[in-house]
Amino acid sequence: MTPEGQALLRQGAAELGLNVEGQLPQFEQLLDLLVEANSRVNLTALKTESDIVLKHFVDSLSCLRGGHLDGAGLRVLDIGTGAGFPTLPLAIVRPEAAFTPLDSIRKKIDFVRAAAEALNLTGVTPLVGRAETLGRDPEHRERYDRVVCRAVAALPILVELGLPLLKPGGLLVAQKGPISDEELHAGRRAAGEVGGRVTEVDAFTLPVLGDARTLVVIKKVAPTPKKYPRREGVPNAQPLFWTTR
């Protein structure tokens, strides 16, 4: 990582209230691993150092806003992790948590596993699979303290995929761009249907870039009905209370 990249990471993290000075070597190594792997297999569309630092690293760290991932021993599931975001940056700065990054594309999970091992992130346990299947597996259903997801789908879809995996009292932290009133309304209705309640809608701008972002936090307040999540592909094709655009 160049001095300019380091400066961007420091500035972006500082604007989020974080000091990553002690973790800079791990972020530098993660950047090198991602760039090298991406030259062989298509892991991410972001190619430049500044884009990776700001749109992957800093953007991932933004889900620490509000303190929802603070606390020792949290079990955190990351739905649709892709090349390991937000899991890998979060695991670097929150090594006390246990992260399970989930993605249906094996080559991406293979990279996440290799990167976690290279960075000595012992609390990261990657999984290949789909949230619909995991949500019906007794080993995973209602087993997690937090579920995070980053720009994966419309809010009603994220709610149906994430809430079944949360323990009662757990939180879904959905990272999104600008969110419309219509999507938020549908997300609130979907949350009520599957045992949750929207507790926070945090609109902010991404440090340095100024891009609009929203963190939507949903608390698991009741057990999820057994019929959710629906079978693979249905939540995306037929979202609860939402007409696909």
Image (spheres, grey):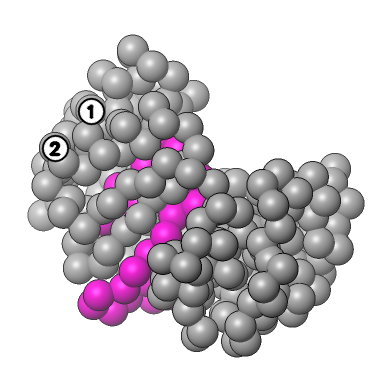
Q: Which percent across, then down, holds residue 170?
A: 48, 79
Q: Which percent across, then down, holds residue 4?
A: 25, 32
Q: Which percent across, then down, holds residue 239?
A: 79, 55
Q: Is residue 231 visible?
A: yes
Q: Residue at x 32, y 32 (%)?
A: 110
- In the visual, does 122 lie left or right of 183? left
Q: Which percent across, then down, holds residue 193?
A: 76, 76
Residue closer to the observer: 15 or 133 = 133
168 w.r.t. 176: above or below: below
Q: Residue at x 28, y 79 (%)?
A: 71
Q: Residue at x 55, y 62 (%)?
A: 135
**Tags 1 and 2 touching, CB below 8 Å:** yes
Mark 2 highlights which residue?
A: 118
Mark 2 residue crowding within 10 angstroms, few (<14) / some (14–19) / many (20+):
some
Mark 1 residue crowding within 10 angstroms, few (<14) / some (14–19) / many (20+):
some
Q: Earlier in the sequence, mark 1 or mark 2?
A: 1
Amino acid marked by disc 1: Leu
Kind of element beneath mark 2: helix
Amino acid marked by disc 2: Ala
Q: Is residue 67 shown in magenta?
A: yes
The furthest residue to the right: 243
Q: Residue at x 72, y 68 (%)?
A: 227
Magenta residue span: 66-91
109 w.r.t. 95: above or below: above
Q: Is residue 176 shown in magenta?
A: no
37 w.r.t. 3: above or below: above
